[in-house]
Image: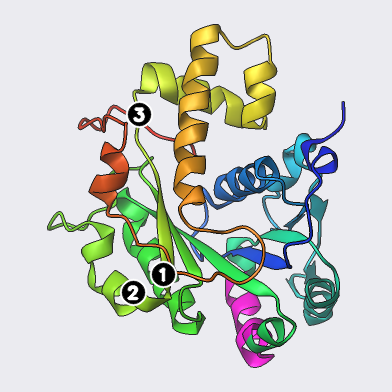
Amino acid sequence: MASESTTKKSEVRGTCVHLLLQGKGGVGKSLVAAILVQYLLARGETVNPIDTDPVNQTLSQYEDLSVQSLQLMRDGSVDQRKFDVLLERLLTESGTFVIDSGAATFIPLWYYMVENRVFQSLAAASRRLIVHSVITGGQALSDTLSGFDDVGEGCREASLVVWLNEYFGPVRDEKGTPFMQMDVSRKHARKILGAVSILRRTQDTFGRDIEEMIAAKMTFNAAIRNGKFSLMAKQRLKIVRDHLFGQLDALSLLGGDKSERPAIPTEEAVASEGETKPASRENAGLLS
Protein backbone atom coordinates (compact mmCIF):
# COMPACT_ATOMS: atom_id res chain seq x y z
CA MET A 1 0.00 0.00 0.00
CA ALA A 2 1.36 3.44 -0.92
CA SER A 3 2.20 5.67 1.99
CA GLU A 4 0.13 8.76 2.63
CA SER A 5 3.12 11.04 2.15
CA THR A 6 3.95 9.64 -1.31
CA THR A 7 0.43 9.88 -2.63
CA LYS A 8 -0.09 13.56 -1.83
CA LYS A 9 1.06 16.14 -4.37
CA SER A 10 0.88 19.89 -3.82
CA GLU A 11 1.40 23.03 -5.80
CA VAL A 12 4.49 25.04 -4.92
CA ARG A 13 3.38 27.30 -2.08
CA GLY A 14 6.76 28.09 -0.58
CA THR A 15 8.87 26.17 1.89
CA CYS A 16 7.66 25.94 5.47
CA VAL A 17 9.46 24.35 8.42
CA HIS A 18 7.47 23.04 11.39
CA LEU A 19 9.68 22.34 14.39
CA LEU A 20 8.43 20.46 17.49
CA LEU A 21 10.24 21.72 20.59
CA GLN A 22 9.63 20.86 24.24
CA GLY A 23 12.20 20.05 26.90
CA LYS A 24 9.84 17.76 28.83
CA GLY A 25 9.50 14.22 27.51
CA GLY A 26 6.35 12.10 27.47
CA VAL A 27 3.90 14.97 26.95
CA GLY A 28 2.61 14.05 23.48
CA LYS A 29 5.13 15.82 21.25
CA SER A 30 5.51 12.96 18.76
CA LEU A 31 1.74 12.51 18.69
CA VAL A 32 1.39 16.19 17.82
CA ALA A 33 3.99 15.76 15.07
CA ALA A 34 2.03 12.82 13.63
CA ILE A 35 -1.23 14.80 13.73
CA LEU A 36 0.47 17.76 12.05
CA VAL A 37 1.90 15.61 9.25
CA GLN A 38 -1.51 14.04 8.62
CA TYR A 39 -3.17 17.45 8.53
CA LEU A 40 -0.67 18.90 6.06
CA LEU A 41 -1.01 15.87 3.78
CA ALA A 42 -4.79 16.13 3.91
CA ARG A 43 -4.50 19.73 2.79
CA GLY A 44 -2.37 18.84 -0.22
CA GLU A 45 1.09 19.70 1.04
CA THR A 46 4.19 17.75 0.04
CA VAL A 47 5.54 16.83 3.48
CA ASN A 48 9.02 15.76 4.57
CA PRO A 49 8.69 14.35 8.12
CA ILE A 50 11.98 13.96 10.02
CA ASP A 51 12.40 12.21 13.38
CA THR A 52 15.46 13.42 15.30
CA ASP A 53 14.58 11.99 18.72
CA PRO A 54 17.66 9.99 19.82
CA VAL A 55 15.79 8.06 22.53
CA ASN A 56 12.22 7.37 21.41
CA GLN A 57 11.72 7.64 17.67
CA THR A 58 7.96 7.38 17.89
CA LEU A 59 7.17 9.37 14.76
CA SER A 60 9.29 7.00 12.66
CA GLN A 61 7.00 4.13 13.63
CA TYR A 62 4.14 5.58 11.55
CA GLU A 63 4.83 3.62 8.36
CA ASP A 64 2.17 5.44 6.33
CA LEU A 65 3.91 8.78 6.88
CA SER A 66 7.29 7.82 5.32
CA VAL A 67 9.29 9.46 8.11
CA GLN A 68 13.05 9.85 7.75
CA SER A 69 15.09 9.05 10.83
CA LEU A 70 18.03 11.35 11.49
CA GLN A 71 20.55 10.51 14.21
CA LEU A 72 21.88 13.67 15.83
CA MET A 73 23.76 11.94 18.65
CA ARG A 74 27.28 10.54 18.47
CA ASP A 75 29.07 8.85 21.38
CA GLY A 76 26.49 10.18 23.80
CA SER A 77 26.70 13.80 22.68
CA VAL A 78 25.05 15.90 19.99
CA ASP A 79 26.81 15.99 16.62
CA GLN A 80 26.73 19.64 15.55
CA ARG A 81 27.70 18.67 12.00
CA LYS A 82 24.48 16.68 11.70
CA PHE A 83 22.63 19.88 12.53
CA ASP A 84 24.50 21.52 9.65
CA VAL A 85 23.30 18.80 7.28
CA LEU A 86 19.72 19.22 8.43
CA LEU A 87 19.84 23.01 8.06
CA GLU A 88 21.31 22.61 4.59
CA ARG A 89 18.21 20.66 3.57
CA LEU A 90 15.89 23.25 5.06
CA LEU A 91 17.65 26.04 3.16
CA THR A 92 17.90 24.33 -0.23
CA GLU A 93 15.02 21.86 -0.61
CA SER A 94 11.39 22.70 -1.29
CA GLY A 95 8.26 21.37 0.38
CA THR A 96 6.98 21.34 3.93
CA PHE A 97 9.17 19.94 6.70
CA VAL A 98 7.95 18.58 10.03
CA ILE A 99 10.81 17.95 12.46
CA ASP A 100 10.19 16.04 15.68
CA SER A 101 12.98 16.66 18.18
CA GLY A 102 13.50 14.77 21.42
CA ALA A 103 13.75 16.07 24.96
CA ALA A 104 17.42 15.00 24.99
CA THR A 105 18.24 17.26 22.05
CA PHE A 106 16.08 20.20 23.14
CA ILE A 107 18.82 22.28 24.80
CA PRO A 108 21.64 21.61 22.27
CA LEU A 109 19.28 22.09 19.29
CA TRP A 110 17.95 25.35 20.68
CA TYR A 111 21.49 26.55 21.47
CA TYR A 112 22.57 25.65 17.93
CA MET A 113 19.66 27.58 16.43
CA VAL A 114 20.39 30.69 18.46
CA GLU A 115 24.18 30.61 18.13
CA ASN A 116 24.07 29.98 14.36
CA ARG A 117 21.24 32.46 13.75
CA VAL A 118 19.06 29.81 12.18
CA PHE A 119 15.95 31.98 12.41
CA GLN A 120 17.61 34.73 10.39
CA SER A 121 19.02 32.25 7.84
CA LEU A 122 15.63 30.68 7.20
CA ALA A 123 13.96 34.08 6.89
CA ALA A 124 16.62 35.28 4.45
CA ALA A 125 15.99 32.18 2.33
CA SER A 126 12.21 32.86 2.38
CA ARG A 127 11.61 29.83 4.60
CA ARG A 128 8.75 30.19 7.04
CA LEU A 129 9.53 28.67 10.46
CA ILE A 130 6.72 27.66 12.79
CA VAL A 131 7.63 26.28 16.21
CA HIS A 132 5.16 23.96 17.97
CA SER A 133 5.30 23.51 21.74
CA VAL A 134 3.15 21.18 23.87
CA ILE A 135 1.70 22.28 27.21
CA THR A 136 0.12 19.58 29.35
CA GLY A 137 -1.90 19.60 32.53
CA GLY A 138 -1.15 17.68 35.72
CA GLN A 139 2.28 17.28 37.27
CA ALA A 140 4.11 18.16 34.05
CA LEU A 141 2.42 21.56 33.74
CA SER A 142 5.27 23.48 35.37
CA ASP A 143 7.95 21.76 33.29
CA THR A 144 6.11 22.26 30.01
CA LEU A 145 5.45 25.92 30.83
CA SER A 146 9.16 26.34 31.49
CA GLY A 147 10.00 24.71 28.16
CA PHE A 148 7.49 26.93 26.39
CA ASP A 149 9.02 30.02 28.02
CA ASP A 150 12.49 29.02 26.79
CA VAL A 151 11.18 28.55 23.26
CA GLY A 152 9.24 31.79 23.35
CA GLU A 153 12.38 33.78 24.15
CA GLY A 154 13.90 32.92 20.78
CA CYS A 155 10.84 32.89 18.52
CA ARG A 156 9.85 35.62 16.11
CA GLU A 157 6.47 37.32 16.17
CA ALA A 158 3.48 35.10 15.33
CA SER A 159 5.59 31.98 14.80
CA LEU A 160 4.66 29.82 17.80
CA VAL A 161 1.80 27.31 17.95
CA VAL A 162 0.80 26.05 21.38
CA TRP A 163 -0.75 22.59 21.77
CA LEU A 164 -2.79 22.23 24.95
CA ASN A 165 -2.83 18.52 25.80
CA GLU A 166 -5.44 17.71 28.46
CA TYR A 167 -4.61 14.01 28.78
CA PHE A 168 -3.07 14.48 32.24
CA GLY A 169 -5.63 17.06 33.31
CA PRO A 170 -6.86 20.57 32.49
CA VAL A 171 -4.17 23.00 31.40
CA ARG A 172 -4.75 25.38 34.31
CA ASP A 173 -2.60 26.47 37.22
CA GLU A 174 -3.41 25.95 40.90
CA LYS A 175 -5.67 29.01 40.84
CA GLY A 176 -7.63 27.68 37.88
CA THR A 177 -6.12 30.15 35.43
CA PRO A 178 -6.24 28.88 31.81
CA PHE A 179 -3.05 28.97 29.77
CA MET A 180 -3.97 31.97 27.63
CA GLN A 181 -4.39 34.06 30.78
CA MET A 182 -1.19 32.92 32.48
CA ASP A 183 1.71 35.34 32.83
CA VAL A 184 3.97 33.24 30.61
CA SER A 185 1.37 33.29 27.83
CA ARG A 186 0.90 37.06 28.09
CA LYS A 187 4.68 37.49 28.09
CA HIS A 188 4.93 35.85 24.65
CA ALA A 189 1.50 36.90 23.35
CA ARG A 190 2.83 38.53 20.18
CA LYS A 191 4.82 35.44 19.32
CA ILE A 192 1.88 33.05 19.64
CA LEU A 193 0.31 32.33 16.27
CA GLY A 194 -2.49 30.32 17.86
CA ALA A 195 -3.44 27.35 20.01
CA VAL A 196 -4.73 23.83 19.39
CA SER A 197 -6.58 22.01 22.17
CA ILE A 198 -6.41 18.22 22.49
CA LEU A 199 -9.56 17.71 24.52
CA ARG A 200 -10.23 15.17 27.23
CA ARG A 201 -12.94 12.79 26.08
CA THR A 202 -14.90 9.87 27.52
CA GLN A 203 -12.36 7.13 28.22
CA ASP A 204 -14.59 4.11 27.47
CA THR A 205 -15.38 5.34 23.95
CA PHE A 206 -13.21 8.09 22.47
CA GLY A 207 -10.31 7.40 24.81
CA ARG A 208 -10.15 3.70 24.05
CA ASP A 209 -10.44 4.23 20.28
CA ILE A 210 -7.61 6.75 20.30
CA GLU A 211 -5.43 4.57 22.49
CA GLU A 212 -5.81 1.62 20.12
CA MET A 213 -5.01 3.78 17.11
CA ILE A 214 -1.91 5.26 18.73
CA ALA A 215 -0.68 1.91 20.04
CA ALA A 216 -0.82 0.51 16.51
CA LYS A 217 0.91 3.66 15.16
CA MET A 218 -1.89 4.15 12.69
CA THR A 219 -2.97 7.39 11.06
CA PHE A 220 -6.57 8.54 11.33
CA ASN A 221 -7.24 7.54 7.73
CA ALA A 222 -5.69 4.11 8.17
CA ALA A 223 -7.70 3.44 11.31
CA ILE A 224 -10.92 4.60 9.66
CA ARG A 225 -10.27 2.19 6.79
CA ASN A 226 -9.28 -0.65 9.11
CA GLY A 227 -11.81 -3.43 9.60
CA LYS A 228 -10.81 -3.94 13.25
CA PHE A 229 -12.54 -0.70 14.27
CA SER A 230 -16.32 -0.69 14.62
CA LEU A 231 -18.48 1.78 12.69
CA MET A 232 -19.03 3.89 15.80
CA ALA A 233 -15.32 3.82 16.64
CA LYS A 234 -14.58 5.11 13.15
CA GLN A 235 -17.17 7.82 13.62
CA ARG A 236 -15.53 8.93 16.87
CA LEU A 237 -12.10 8.99 15.22
CA LYS A 238 -13.51 11.20 12.48
CA ILE A 239 -14.89 13.57 15.12
CA VAL A 240 -11.49 13.87 16.81
CA ARG A 241 -9.66 14.27 13.49
CA ASP A 242 -12.05 16.90 12.16
CA HIS A 243 -11.92 18.89 15.40
CA LEU A 244 -8.12 18.97 15.37
CA PHE A 245 -7.91 19.74 11.66
CA GLY A 246 -10.49 22.49 12.03
CA GLN A 247 -8.39 24.23 14.65
CA LEU A 248 -5.30 23.94 12.41
CA ASP A 249 -7.23 25.38 9.47
CA ALA A 250 -7.80 28.54 11.51
CA LEU A 251 -4.03 29.07 11.88
CA SER A 252 -3.19 29.44 8.16
CA LEU A 253 -0.26 27.03 8.33
CA LEU A 254 -0.08 26.11 4.65
CA GLY A 255 2.72 27.24 2.39
CA GLY A 256 4.89 30.31 2.81
CA ASP A 257 4.49 33.56 4.71
CA LYS A 258 1.11 34.48 6.16
CA SER A 259 -0.55 37.68 5.14
CA GLU A 260 -2.66 37.98 8.25
CA ARG A 261 -2.45 36.82 11.82
CA PRO A 262 -5.54 34.88 12.96
CA ALA A 263 -7.23 35.59 16.25
CA ILE A 264 -6.13 33.34 19.11
CA PRO A 265 -9.10 31.38 20.48
CA THR A 266 -9.59 30.87 24.18
CA GLU A 267 -9.63 27.34 25.58
CA GLU A 268 -13.30 27.80 26.41
CA ALA A 269 -14.17 28.74 22.83
CA VAL A 270 -12.28 25.77 21.41
CA ALA A 271 -13.90 23.37 23.84
CA SER A 272 -17.42 24.64 23.21
CA GLU A 273 -17.17 24.59 19.44
CA GLY A 274 -19.37 21.58 18.80
CA GLU A 275 -17.86 19.65 21.67
CA THR A 276 -18.90 18.74 25.20
CA LYS A 277 -15.98 19.00 27.60
CA PRO A 278 -16.12 16.34 30.35
CA ALA A 279 -15.53 17.59 33.87
CA SER A 280 -14.34 14.43 35.63
CA ARG A 281 -10.72 13.23 35.79
CA GLU A 282 -11.86 9.75 34.69
CA ASN A 283 -12.29 11.11 31.18
CA ALA A 284 -9.20 11.19 29.01
CA GLY A 285 -7.99 12.72 25.77
CA LEU A 286 -5.21 11.55 23.46
CA LEU A 287 -2.29 9.55 24.76
CA SER A 288 1.08 11.19 25.07
Where is residue 243? Give x, y as percent.
44, 36
Residue neighbourhood size for the residue with mark 3, other residues' Cα within 10 Å, grouped as few (<14), some (14–19), many (≥20): many
Residue at image x 81%, y 54%?
Answer: 69
Of the pair 205 and 220, the residue shown nearer to us: 220
> Residue at image x 47%, y 31%?
240
Residue 16's place in the image compared with 228, above or below, is below
Pick whichever, 283 or 122, lies toward us: 122
Decide whether the magenta segment is chiefly helix, strand or loop: helix
Q: Amino acid at mark 1?
A: Ile
Q: Which residue is mark 3?
A: 201
Residue visible at 36% across and 31% down?
Answer: 284
Q: Residue at x 69, y 61 (%)?
A: 99
Disc 2 target residue: 189
Q: Which residue is mark 1?
A: 192
Q: Report if the CB atoms under discs 1 and 2 are less than 8 Å apart.
A: yes
Residue 118: within the magenta?
yes
Circles 1 and 3: CB atoms closer than 8 Å:
no
The vertical placement of 55 against 60, above or below, is: below
Whole-number angstrom distance, CA of label 1 to CA of label 2: 5 Å
Q: Nearer the viewer, residue 199 or 23?
A: 199
- Among numbered discs 2 and 3, the one appearing first in the sequence: 2
